[in-house]
Every structure is written in structure tokens, then in C-alpha cells.
Image (tube, coloured by chain):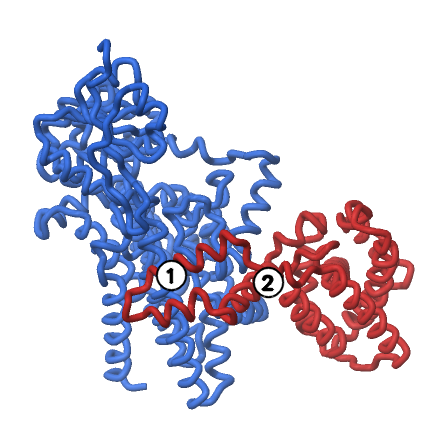
Amino acid sequence: MKIFKPIKVLLIIGLLMFFNNWLRTGSRYDYQIIFLILGIFILFLLLASWGSFLIQNPKTTIVPKAVETFLVLLYAALTVYQIKSTDIKNAYEYTPVQIDTQIKRMRYYPVKLTKLGYYLENKKETLILYKYEENFFSMLDINEYFPDYFSLVLLPFTLIGLYQFTIFKQKLIKVLFIISLFIISILGVNGLAGPVLLFPFINLFAFLGVVKILQFKK
Amino acid sequence: MSRLKSWVILIVIISFALLVYTFKIGDTPGGVYVDEATVSYNAISILKTGNDEYGMPHPVLFRLFGSYTPPLFIYLAAFTMKFFGSGIIVTRLMSSASALLSSGFLYLFLEKSKILKNRLSIFVVCFFYSVSPWLIFNARLGYETTFAYLLNIVGIYFSYLALKNPKKIILALPILALSAYTAHTQKYLFIIYLFFYLILFGKRFLAKVNRKYFLISLFITILIFIPYLSIIGSPAFWVKNLNFFDPGGSGIVENIILQTLIYFSPKTLFFLLPDIDLQHTIPQISVLYNWMVIPFFTGLYLLFRNFKKLENKFIVFLFIVTIIPAVLSGRFISIQRALPFLFPLILVIGFGIDFFIQKFGRIANVILFSTLTAYSLLNLYRSYFVLFPQERAIAWNWGYDQVAEFIKKNPNKRFLLDNSRNPRNYIELLYFLEYPSDVYQHEVDQVYRNNYYAAEPQIYEYKFGNIEVRNIDWGPDSCLDQIIIGDELTVSDAQMKDHHLKEIYRISDFREKPVFIFYQTGSKPGC
């Protein structure tokens, strides 16, 4: 098993950051972007270093408490940014045309099933659920991330890394990842700077993919 | 599980699927799409005269609208119509039967491959496959796609069996070759499939004991391809090739990667189809139910975890190969060309379903199955049986039967049907008017028959009986005594006034939106 030295890990991270397209286009959003980039970068750095350790010791569960705390705090800050930079009302609002379509659709049901038509086409809760469904599947859509936010070059590494990620025993990163998925599925992917909460994880997966391939070659 | 119990469950699944496939099949889809009309009309033409609409005797590829469609489905439709009568229901029912048989072959594949650990999972997977929106949509359309898909699956099934029993290759390749005679997608898929199949699994057929089976199979396949070989040098054979490697706005490689990502995206598969052709889509539902995304991801994980198993390798091979023709076939997503992908997709989902069935207890499984069935069928009812007939009626060329009725009632009038927004709509009138094919074959421009495989460009002007189908030429057309038939955009208010047109009839859809408007001409002063 090849153990990676910190300098090599940093080199890979540096290279991966080059393929983070959002870094180049992100500056147009607002002044907070510098802090955002810094936050994501540090978070990713930690995750990657940790990941590099984990990939060599997949069954380990030992994590320094201080690292864990810092990671959670940084993650919380990023979450606050994600929430603040997303217009949640907009994500669940129906345009007048959409409202009109829903009303028309209600009329397509047979008279006997008018109530069902109302439940499926016009009930407030159902409409919110449809919007949530849209957000959920947008979150799962690779095309939302590649190539707008990340270069296509990273894609194969990300997929390999994602598989690696699933076999880790380490719980905290997994929990943070699942929380991110949950938050983005509620907020949608159309925040001011995109689904930034997932960016560190995509980088982490790409990193794990690269490390796995380099290990494989050895 | 006893044999009897298995049979009972299978019969219940098949009966239910049959019910869903055939329920109101004549009315939903709402209209008769031009592809359905042309297939039916040409099948009738072959049955009655032995020639297609252009007068070509027993073509190897059917010209239709210039697409040069592989012929097997049309010949089979002609044969079926001999016994069951002509009409769109016959060709649609052929698709229903194909879909049902594909479920049967899925069952056989799952039985033989033993990829699912719990036997109950086989039935659950077959059930959800049978009632999946993608299969139901294809089980109710009257052209070649579903039959080609069936042959594909049968070929895949035997090519899988051949990995364990090389004798089966004798059936596998010829059946796949037949699928190449059914639809364009399968024509390309056959080559791609064979190429990668032989690279990945071909070694076993080179062993001395197995070589003869492979050679026999190859010999039969070459025999099957003789008709194609006879026209391989003609432009008609390569007509759909123009779409291949069409890079669109970006480079070829980038285009292929982006297309692949869209086809593989869970959003495409489980939520919203990005296919811009409304005729291909069902409102508010994609090709599979949204909940299937969970077994899909689970299945993918399990598939790659045990990648070294022969069955898993074979499924990964199918997963990649079956999508290639769709990815390479142009810049727009066409879910119709991706239909062969449904089979490996359902196998991956099957892994996931099997995983959960094993995890949960009997009661939890019953509750989950009942809930998901109810939820799926409710979604299906909403999207396919309520929204689809209304919102996709125009895309399915609704209303031409009524146009034909009007024309039939006025046999002494001249008609001009505007085709500026639907250049292929002449076939709708031929089909609904039951226009005698032997008569039409003499009225159609003979250049198409004389240079049949030369892929002469289509001239979208048609004349048969008392009907012309073309764009309006306001100069002469407004002076002739005729009825112009068009949609809302054909004639503006100003044109109506300028040319002294009089609206005499209109056909509106379920939403009271005019679909066809009939104008009487001939009262323009100075004509």
C-alpha cells in the first residue's frame, strides 16, 4: 500500500482546484465569495487529508476531536451561507402560467374524480411536494455540476471516488454529506453561487478517485 | 415457492399488464401519429398490392417519409392485418404483445441468471417493469420501436445464455440480426453490440469445441443480411447516418459526453425527460417512477461491488452498449432511440429491489409493495390516462380523422391542406380516407419509385383525388374554388380579409382550442 506524503496530497489538491470552474466564474456573485472560496478550500483540504488517511486505512474510526470540531464549525458556516444565498420562496413559487396549467389540469379529470384532481393538481401541499421533487432530482443531476461548476475532466475521478466513499467506515463525513444532500434538496440548486454545500464533497470524491487510481498503478 | 404459485403470480402480472396496455388503446394516445399512419398505410398497401405507397414492390427498406425504415415490422403488420383487419389498433396491439413478451424474457433472464437472491424479487421486478411508464408508452404505439426492442431482448437473452452454453450463440446472433431489420436504432446497435460482445466475451467461442457453433451462427447471420447487402451501396441504406456524429454546437467528444450524462442522469430517468419532441413524452412523469431512483443507486452500488461476477460484467456491458446508438444519433435527446437501455436499467433497479426485499421482513415487504404499487399506478393514471390524452393530443396529430370525415362528406369539393407546420401530414389523410393504395401509387411522383434507393429528397407537395397537401401560394390559391384547411396560424385575420376567405367549419380539441379551421375561397374580386 502506497502511503501518500503531505506534499503529494497538496499537489493533487492544487491540481483538482484548477478544474473547479466555479472558482473562475464565481467572483461575479458578491464580495462574500472570497470567504466562501476560503471556506470551501479549507473544508476540502481537511476532508481530503482525512480522506487520504482513510483510503489507506479504510476501517479506521479514529479522528482527532479538534479536527472534528473545526470541520463541523466550518461546515456550519458554509451551511449558513448556502441558506442565506438561496431565495427559498422562489424555489417553491409557481408562476402565473404554472398556476393556470394546474387549474386547467384539474378540469381534465372525470367528474367522479374531481376531488382526486384537486388533490393531485391544485392542493397546496401537493404543489409544494412537486417542487421538492424537482429540487431533489436537480440535486441528483450530474449535469447541474458538470461542466458548469466542475470541469468534465474531474468526472471519472469523482465517480470512482464516490464509490470509494461508500465503503468508508468513517461516519462524520458521511453524515455531513447526507445533511448536505438533504439541505440542497430543500433549497434547490439555484442559489446565488449554486449548490456550494456540495462542492467540498465533489472535490473530495475527485481526490479519492485520483488517489485510488494512483494507488492502483503502484 | 411452488411451480404452481409461480405460474399463478406470472399470470396475474401478465393479465394486469395486458389490461393496462390495451385499456382504451384506440383512444389513448389521442390521435394517430404520422409514423403510425405511414406504417399502417404501407402495411395495407403491401397487403393489397404487394407494393409500398410509392409503388415499389416488396422493398428492403421502406422509404416512408424519406427515413428508409427497416421493413420487418411493416411486413409483419401486413401479415397480421390479413387475419385481424387493418387499422391502427392492430399495429398498436402488436406493440402490446411485444411489450408483454419482453416481460416474459425478462422473467426468463432473471430465472436463468440467478442475479437476484430472493425468488420473490423476480416477480416484483417483472411487475414494476411491466407497468413502468416507458414500457406502457411503447406498448401502446403503432410502429416498429417496441417490436425491435423485443427482438433485442430475445437476442440479449440468448447471447447471455451463450456465455454458459456456447450452442445458444446459434440463436443469439440471428435474432439480433433480425432486430436490425426492424428499426434504425437496432441496425446500429447490432454492430456495436457484436463488436463489444466479441471483445469482452468472444474468447470462449474461439475454443475448438465451440468454434463450430459460432461459425454456424455467423453463417446464418450473413444469410439474414443478404437483402441488406444487396442495397448497402445505395444512399438509402446510409440515410440515418447523417445524424451520427452530428456534433451540434460543441465538439464531437464534448457532445457525446454531455449526451451520455443526460441519458444517465437520474433526473432524466426518474423525473423529467429532456426530449424536445412532445410526441415522445408523457406529462409529469419520466420513463420510470420516481421512487425507483433509490433501488437504482443501491443496484448500481451492488453491481460494481461484485463486478467480477460474469452476470454483473454482462449487465455493465449492456448498460453501456445499449445507450450508444442514442448518444451518437444527434444533438437532441431522443428517448425513443434509447429504449434498449430500459432492459439493463431494470436489471440494475432489480438488484436494488432484491436488496431491500431481503432486508425487510414479510409484513414490511407486503406494505411496501402495496404502497409503491398504489403510488405508481396513481402516478400512471394521472400522467398517462388523464394529462397525456389532453396535453399531447396535438403532438399525436389529433383531429385528422375528423378532417377526413369532412372531406368524405364533400366529395365534389377541392381541398388544400396546409402542411407548413406538419410536412408529413398527407399520410394522415391517406390513412383516414382509406385512400386506395393502388390509385395513390400512380398519382405519386414516379421519380421516387424509379430511383427508390437513391434517397431522392422529399418534395413536400402531394396531390391525390380532390386533395392537395402543400404550403399555400396565396396568388393562385385564393382565386380557386376550394377549401383551405389549416391550423390557427395558417391564415391571419388580415389574410382572411384580403383574400375574402370565409370560415366554414372548425375542429376544436378538448380544451376548445381550434386545431383545424376550414376556409372557403373563390369569392375574391378580380379573380
Residue in the foreground of this view, choosing between B338 and B201: B338
Is A179 or B261 nearer to us in this picture?
Answer: A179
Q: Which chain is blue?
A: B
Relative height, residue A186 to residue B514 (above, below): below
Q: In which image quadrant can residue B418 be found?
A: top left
Q: Which residue is mark 1?
A: B383
Residue type at mark 2: give it: Tyr
Q: Position of residue B121 (x, y in %)?
A: 40, 77
Q: What residue sits right under mark 2 in the picture?
A: A92
Q: Is residue B448 visible?
A: yes
Mark 1 Cα-neighbour bin, 10 Å: few <14, some 14–19, many ≥20: some
How far is the residue under mark 1 from the one under mark 2?
Answer: 22 Å
As shown in the figure, which amino acid type bears the numbered disc 1? Ser
Tell me residue A19's x, y (percent). Answer: 77, 49
Chain letter belonging to callout 2: A
Q: Is residue A53 above or below residue A26?
A: below
Q: Position of residue B148 (x, y in %)?
A: 31, 50
Q: Secondary structure at mark 2?
A: helix
Q: Nearer the viewer, residue B260 or B218?
A: B260
Q: Residue at x 26, y 35 (%)?
A: B517
Q: Position of residue B507 (x, y in %)?
A: 24, 41
Q: From the image, state the color of chain A.
A: red
